[in-house]
Structure formats: C-alpha cells, structure tokens
Amino acid sequence: MTARKSYRQQFMLTLGQEEVPVLVSAMRRKSMRLQLNSSGEIDLRIPLGTAKDQVLAFVKQHHDWLVQRRSEFRQRRQARSEHLLVQGRQLPVRESALSEFMVSEQAVWVPSGWSVEQTQLALDTWLRSQAKLEFTRMIERWWPAFSPFASQRPQLRIKKMRTRWGSLSQRGYINLNLALMQLPEHLLELVVVHELCHLKHFDHGPGFRALMSQCLPDWRTREQQLSQLARLL
C-alpha cells in the first residue's frame, strides 16, 4: 500500500461580510503557504499530515492580510469591468452593438450582460491569436545575439502562468506568459532577453546581470515598470 502524495479539500472562510472559498492542497512540503488565485479564491498549501487546528490557526493569523488582498482583488475586478490593458494601452470597455467581442484601437467591445470572467476569457482568446506572431518576432529579433550560446533556437510555448513572466527549459523551450500581450512591447522585450540570457547563465549572478546590461542598459528600470503594471492585470 502506497502513502498518499497529495489531497485537496475546500471550506468557506468569513472575511468581513463575505464568504470566500479556501482551497486546501496537502502535499509533500515543509511549510504552509497562502495566496489569492486569479478567481479571488484562497489557495492554501500545507504539508501532509498537518492537523486541522494548525491549519485554522494559520489562516486566522493571516486574517488581516487576506482581507487586504480580497479588497485589492475587488478593486482590480471593478477596474477590469471598466478598462482593460491591451499591449500597453488602457482601453475602455464598451457594450457592443453587434453582440460580439472585438478589440479596436479605441475600445474593447463586449456583448451586453457579459461578466468580467467572460470578458477576460474572450480577451485571452484574442491575445493568444496575436501572441505567437508577436512573441516569435521578438525572439527572432534577438536570436542573432544569443545564437552562439545554443545549437538551435528555443521552441516557443505560450502559457498562462500565475507567478512567472517566462521560463527557459532544459528541453529547449522558451515559455512566455500570455499576459505579456497586455503589456508594452519594451516589457515583452525585457522578458524575452531575460530568458535568452539563461542560455549562457543559468542563475541570476554577476555574469547574468552583466549580459542583461550589455543587451538592455535600462533593464532595471524596465523591471520596475513591469512590477508596477503587473498590479493592473
């Protein structure tokens, strides 16, 4: 008989005047971790065998933090119902007279009665239709500078990632977050160059930072801009 490697449970938590789902994942880890997911639910990861009273005490200890994060989530949700960030531009959300989703230079047009979730799903579909061309073009722009460090160009994969803008795998893939399509081009460039620098330097040590500075002298400023805009997504 093999031991369980993980399990999931759910309970409701009262935060102020609202009930919020807490998704509990027990797994092989050393400590407990709380975070708010993109749907506003609470993800709680705990070590296997953690007692229920320990879990509840941990959640209670972070009550004020959770209230603050939920407040920020509601503010972002309200903002997304009024404006959406598309390739670095804050476009107003407007009701479509044609009952279809459309992105123009002036606005994002959505059918009457759509929820924030429906609008975001449609936006993701539209962004994905544009992303392969835009991401590939950026990689090709920089590949001549990085080709000496690899036998072939990494293969592009586009993903929705919660905690990363990009990654470079040892199997020859460069993974880029779909959300980069909502940001200005110079921030997409920052992430692409960052990942390509890992072809030569696997860590973020002095060699990596020197190569980043050689390619993008203002990369630290761009990183600050990336952190600021991430709060709008």
Image: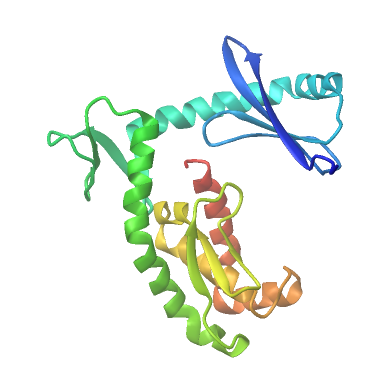
Question: Is 66 rendered above or below residue 214?
Answer: above
* Location of residue 100 in the rendering, given as x and y in whole percent from the top left corner: 19, 39
Question: Is 135 rendered above or below residue 119?
Answer: below
* Location of residue 33 in the rendering, given as x and y in whole percent from the top left corner: 75, 36
Question: Is 138 rendered above or below residue 145?
Answer: above
Task: Identify which residue is drawn at 28% across, 38% down.
Answer: 92
Protein image colouring = rainbow
Q: Tell me where residue 45 sits by quadrant.
A: top right
Q: Tell me where residue 108 sits by quadrant.
A: top left
Q: Farthest residue to the top: give it.
A: 17
From this viewpoint, is residue 217 visible? Answer: no
Q: Is residue 166 left or right of residue 91?
A: right
From this viewpoint, is residue 39 visible? Answer: yes
- Which of the image's four quarters has the N terminus? top right
Q: Nearer the viewer, residue 54 or 206?
A: 54
Q: Nearer the viewer, residue 67 or 38?
A: 38
Task: Identify which residue is drawn at 70% across, 76% down.
Answer: 201
Q: Farthest residue to the left: give it.
A: 98
Q: Nearer the viewer, residue 85 or 7?
A: 7
Task: Identify which residue is drawn at 75% across, 39% down.
Answer: 6
Q: Farthest residue to the front: give it.
A: 1
* Location of residue 189 in the rendering, given as x and y in whole percent from the top left corner: 48, 67
Task: Identify which residue is drawn at 52% across, 46% down.
Answer: 230
* Location of residue 80 in the rendering, given as x and y in whole percent from the top left corner: 39, 34
